[in-house]
Image (spheres, rainbow, N blue to C red):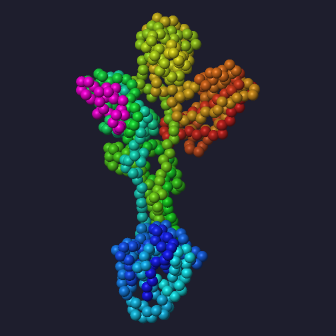
Amino acid sequence: MTTNLYGDGGVGLSGYTDTLAQSFFVERNLLLTKIDLYFSDKDSTLPVELSIRRIEGDKPSGNILVDSTVVVPAEDIITSANANIATTFTFPVPVKLDSGQYCFALSSDTKKHRVHVGQLGGEDVGTGSIIAKNPYNGVLFMSTNGINWSIDQTRDIKFKIYRANVTSSTATVDFVMQKNTMSTPFITVLENDPFQSYNNVSTVRVRHKKHGFPSGAIVKFNGLAGEFNYTVNATSNVITFNNIPVTLLANTFLTVSNISLDSYTVDVGANAMVLANISNGRFGRSGITSTTLLPFSAVYPSVGVVTPPRTNIGYKLKTTNSSFTVSNFEDISTDTKEFSDTRILVDSKNRDTSMGGAESFTYRVTMTSSDSYVSPMIDTSFASAVFIIPDINSPSTADNLNVDLVTIANANTLISFNSTGNVTIGGTLEKANVKTMVPGAFVTITTSGNVTNNGTFRLTAVSNEGASFSIPVSNAVPTGNVTSIVYRPMFVSDEAASGSSTRSNYVTRKIELATPATSLLVRLAVSQPVGSDIEVYFKLQNGNEASRFDTKEYTQLDLGTIKDTVDGQFVDIEKFVDSLASFSAFVIKIVLKSTSIAAYPKVKDLRIIALE
């Protein structure tokens, strides 16, 4: 006996009409792999869709189980007159079924597909015998609209269901980073004019935020044609950047040196003829891309999983440190892994050069089962990893390389000093140079005519017209000495009113006092790992400073020696500063520094009290 698969309405997942469903019972958890059906006739062109649903309210649910839809084209459907040849509907992945009642629903847009059914009292077309009992407790459902279903208690579709037989107790899946594409962290777009060249020097400084490169790593730059600020050398007709030929910098592998958090240098290998013409200045314009590494101190890996009873899933990580050394697998007991040192994701070039092609990051999922009926399952479409990069550094005057130093004045006799730190300078070029300096950076002064005025000093102020600048202390010296001044631009101290080189700062709002005060009490709890530092600064406003408070420098608060701590351990700090000039407002700045993104300080429970 047969029945067709066509009705007047009701749409399946793939747009076919729901017409027949056969229920079946599952006594225990299992993984459904395929279903065999037996066709007596078929359409020559239109397919058949099968899907698995739960039985809810004594009828097929409208909700189709995930990954349980299979569409078999007409050419793959096999027919037989005696129901002895099956057409197999294989699911794309095993379908997890808990104990309970389910059905498979059939859909098609043609009357020509017909499946074999058995009916009590009818004849078995395979054996010719009479069907005297129902060997299975399922029922046949029919619908003309895919919504309202009627039950046929006397007939059942002939079918065979297959489950997975889990023969291995353990399996592993390794997730690694996708190779170089713009969707990965291994390519980044640099800021405008990212390159800095220097007069007659083969070294180029590159401004590249959070690049992750250790010294000795390899980098490559690319840019769209016409977006470099280039000129054409009239004699050799070579495109150059500040007289550096493009072939020495673009689309070639270069070695990284002199690293800081947001910059490094490369040597372009210029020969003597090129060196003689290289000029000072920033260049590159926009659209420059660079290979990059991704440093991180913690990772939050995640993957969609299903763990039936008697199964388990374990997680491990293999990572790479800044020396390009790959770790062994480490167990992860939670969904977070924090590291005691910096780890990096490595691009393919540096992997091949420094790691023998090894993967820099591997997330291993280990699945185990003690039951042949079930297995843990993972959904790779939900696999992800969030990498944490704390925005912290530990800058110093040592960040200034020799090539970074800028001569402000050379053997100038028009420089004078007063007794309060003000330095006046003469000369049109020298004044223009002074205007490029910023408060908080440093200058080195030589042959000033007074030993107190010679040395390296922090800039406390720079005049807008470039005629003068200020340092913390000086002795009065008139003009006439052959004084030289060199500017050190790559480090701005935390005393500066703004723009310091330290990346991690907490600055309170300006706190106005109802009654003027002369003392400050600062209390806070700190956690300071080895290699990190915590500094506190303040600035005060009296009644006459409102107009210039924003440009006023900070004063460092001496916290004394802070004991190094382990992560999660805090120590209480209290500092009292009295005998201050009367003030009516103040700002507190907390500066966090570390030489490693994996060992950073923390502060909590900040309390500030202003006292008369």
- Residue positioned 38% across, 77% down in the render: 43
Whole-percent x, y for residue 592 in the image: 56, 35
Mark yes or no: residue 456 visible: no
Q: Which residues are magenta?
A: 222-249
The quarter of the picture where residue 512 lies is top right
Query: Magenta includes 500?
Result: no
Whole-percent x, y for residue 467 in the image: 51, 13
Whole-percent x, y for residue 205 in the image: 39, 30
For the C terminus, the quadrant is top right
- Residue positioned 51% across, 9% down in the render: 416
The answer to which of 267 and 184 lies nearer the viewer is: 184
Is 92 rendered above or below residue 455? below
Whole-percent x, y for residue 100 in the image: 55, 76
- Residue positioned 43% across, 66% down in the render: 170
Left or right, residue 351 beside residue 132:
left
The residue positioned farthest toward the front in the image shown:
8
The answer to which of 34 and 332 lies nearer the viewer is: 34
- Residue positioned 35% across, 76% down in the render: 44
